[in-house]
Image (cartoon, rainbow, N blue to C red):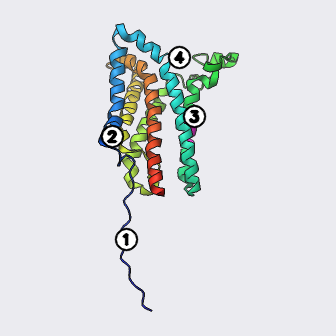
Amino acid sequence: MAAVATPDIPASPPVRAGDELGGRARAAIVFTPLAIIIACVAVCIPPASRQFYERFTSENGPIEMVTFVLALVAAVMGVRHAIALFRRRERFAACFYIVFALGMFFIGMEEISWGQQLFGWKTPENWNQANAQGETTLHNLGPFQGHNDILRFAFGFGGLIGVLIAPLLPRLRVLFPSRVLVMWFLIIAGISAAQMYCDAVPNGPLVGPINKVGDRLAEVVELLITIAAVLYLWLNARRLSKSTA
């Protein structure tokens, strides 16, 4: 019996996270980080409102606690993504999300000094001497103190690179961030790069005002990182559900 030819069925186009978001939702995601930074700059610079701003960004203040909670939420979401991908035998992508989840967990626990801020235990003497803030944290230890802007820049720059190379690696599209997050990555990387410039060129042009504003925005940038992480994972959860439908 002669074989019956069947017409080729075109492959479905890759699902892009954010493609089915409504216009208002996309606009909200795109412009929210810009609105947050503008509002913070408007409040943190004038002396009249600076004290109010410093209360929000102080140790154990609202900004730090929200950052802690969102980092843990992102960690849980990352683990759930990894489990789903392991079940689909996509081990590389699953391992990536495990590493991402561990990074978010680390950020969250560093925010509360691994529980010290909540339970109030005393810092061991040797650790107290080595830590710039006398806390049980790693990011305040000698070589890391004052250089956390490098890690913040790496997050923002890494997100931008992910957006750029996503079309080149369609098989790994479940890993890459949506283009609607570009503004988040640009702001995170931009502010962090400005702080890195101040560290590298302490006597350079405009270092004084840039450093002053950058230091005041450091906690807010960490908050933006955790919000961007949750959005990234939420948008990619939509992508995962579409690819398994």
| 202 or 213, nearer to the observer | 213
The residue under label 3 is 105
- Which of the two discs, 4 and 3, labels the residue nearer the N terminus? 4
Q: Are marks 1 and 4 in contact (CB under 8 Å)?
A: no
Nearer-N-terminus badge (1/4): 1
SS assignment for the magenta stretch, majority: helix
Q: Earlier in the sequence, mark 2 or mark 3?
A: 2
For label 4, the SS is loop
Q: Position of residue 97 (x, y in %)?
A: 54, 45
Q: CA distance from mark 2 to mark 3?
A: 27 Å
For label 1, the residue is 9
- The reply to whether dot 1 and dot 3 touch (C-beta < 8 Å) is no
Distance in Å between CA atoms under marks 1 and 2: 32 Å
Q: Residues within 10 Å of mark 1 (few under 14, many from 20)?
A: few
| Residue assigned mark 4 | 59
Image quadrant holding the N terminus, namely bottom left
Label 1 or label 2, whichever comes before in sequence order: 1
Q: Which residues are magenta?
A: 99-104
Q: Is residue 56 left or right of residue 118?
A: left
Q: CA distance from mark 1 to mark 3?
A: 44 Å
How far apart are the two marked residues, 1 and 4, measured between alpha carbons? 59 Å
Residue 64 image offset from top left, x and y in percent: 51, 22
Dot 2 crowding, Cα within 10 Å, few <14, some 14–19, many 20+: some
Measured along the vertical axis of the image, is residue 169 above or below residue 156? Answer: below
Q: Quadrant of residue 8?
A: bottom left
Q: Are marks 2 and 3 in contact (CB under 8 Å)?
A: no
Q: Residues within 10 Å of mark 3 (few under 14, many from 20)?
A: many
Amino acid carrying mark 1 in the image: Ile
Q: Is residue 14 magenta?
A: no
